[in-house]
Amino acid sequence: MKIENVSVWLKSLCLAMLFGLLSLGAAHAAEKRDFRSADTHLPDYPTVQAMQYMGKILSERTQGRLSITVFHSRQLGEETDTIHMSQAGAVDLLRISMSPFTDLIPETRVLTLPFLFSSDEHYQAVLNGPIGQEVLAAFEPHGFVGLAYYESGSRSFYTTKKPIKSLKDLKGLRIRVQNSDLIAATIEALGATPVKMSFGQVLTALETNIIDGAENNWPSYESTGHYKAAAHYSLSRHLRVPEVVVMSKSVWDTLSPDDQILIRQAALDSQQVMAQLWKERVDRARKTVEAANVQVYELEDIDAFQQAVKPVYDKFIRDPKLRDLVRRIRATKP
Ligand code: GTR
């Protein structure tokens, strides 16, 4: 073979290899992925529906290349289990309450503090503003990418035997809490005994008097059937813990920048659907439980509740960075 022919042949070989590599890359970028998402709630709950909507638009926008399967009803385990699974990359997405992150990610504590927000509008302004973004970004060093917040209203106490109308009524009661030291300390500061327990165990614990009560928003109080076992609902509104949509960081890092943008956008778009579904469900849940003879109470001494939880701030918000976040939350205009 002549020298010129050899060089032409070599050039063609190099080009062929280059195209080969490029098309391999393209095939990789175009890989079909079905993301597994975990949720503790039943299929008709707003969070599950909103995540399914996120999957639907993601699939439409990628001609079926990217999709989401929502494993609802704790099929993948309780919330704390799914946090560990997601850190390990075994579960791709979580729709989850922020509470079980408070022991792991210090910044999440500021949105979980009792009686911090003065109204729904104040809460929305914080979540949708720079502080909300900073808290979502704080997930990253811990193995998650924070994508969006979902609405979850406020949490109030419900009890089996007698209503909570004032601080003294909480004295000595065993109240179930989510897996969070901060929330356990809140209940303790209010004079009750916190019992950390997974969501799935609460109904039996209420029915068997292992606990005297729990606390949650209207839709969770209704969807779980807790109202049948604990028919006194006291509107303490002591917590407004947001729900979050997060992706496993190890999964996120395998995605192309374009796909990351698509996923972020789909999560944000699902937020609007969630807001609408949430509003409807709160009304429906309240009507359902009231029709089932649940008694609803307002607190007589909300100030006493607010005073009692002050030590929780001192204990959990020591770091100057967290203190500053709390100061900025208080200064945020609704
Ligand atoms: C609900 C929340 C769930 C779960 C539950 C609980 O309001 O949507 O994700 O955290 O509370 O109390 O465990």
Image (tube, rainbow, N blue to C red):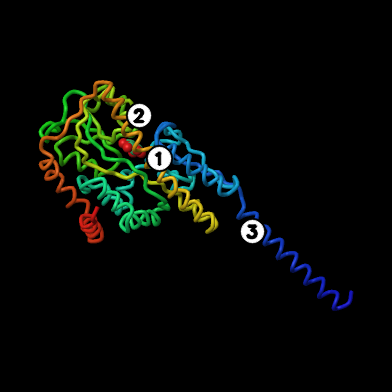
Residue hosting label 3: 25
Ligand 1 in which quarter: top left
Q: From the image, state whether disc 1 or disc 3 is nearer to you.
A: 3
Mark 3 is surrounded, within 10 Å at the Cα level, by few (under 14), some (14 to 19) or many (20 or more) other residues, namely few
Helix, strand or loop at mark 1: helix
Residue depicted at x 48% and y 52%: 250
Residue under pointer 1: 81
Q: Label 3 is placed on what type of residue?
A: Gly
Judging depth in this view, the residue of 200 and 84 nearest the camera is: 200
Q: Position of residue 79 (x, y in %)?
A: 38, 39
Q: Is mark 2 within 8 Å of ligand 1?
A: no
The residue furthest right is 1
In the picture provided, is 185 more to the left or to the right than 130? left
Q: CA distance from mark 1 to mark 3?
A: 35 Å
Q: Which residue is mark 2?
A: 223
Q: Residue 177's x, y, as percent?
A: 26, 36
Type of the residue with mark 1: Asp
> Which structural element holds mark 3?
helix
Q: Give the mark nearest the N terminus, 2 or 1.
A: 1
User: What residue is drawn where x is 40% and y is 56%?
Assistant: 140
Q: Position of residue 109 (x, y in %)?
A: 27, 50
Q: Which label sits in the foreground, 2 or 1? A: 2
Q: Is residue 14 above or below residue 265?
A: below
* Snapshot quadrant of residue 309: top left
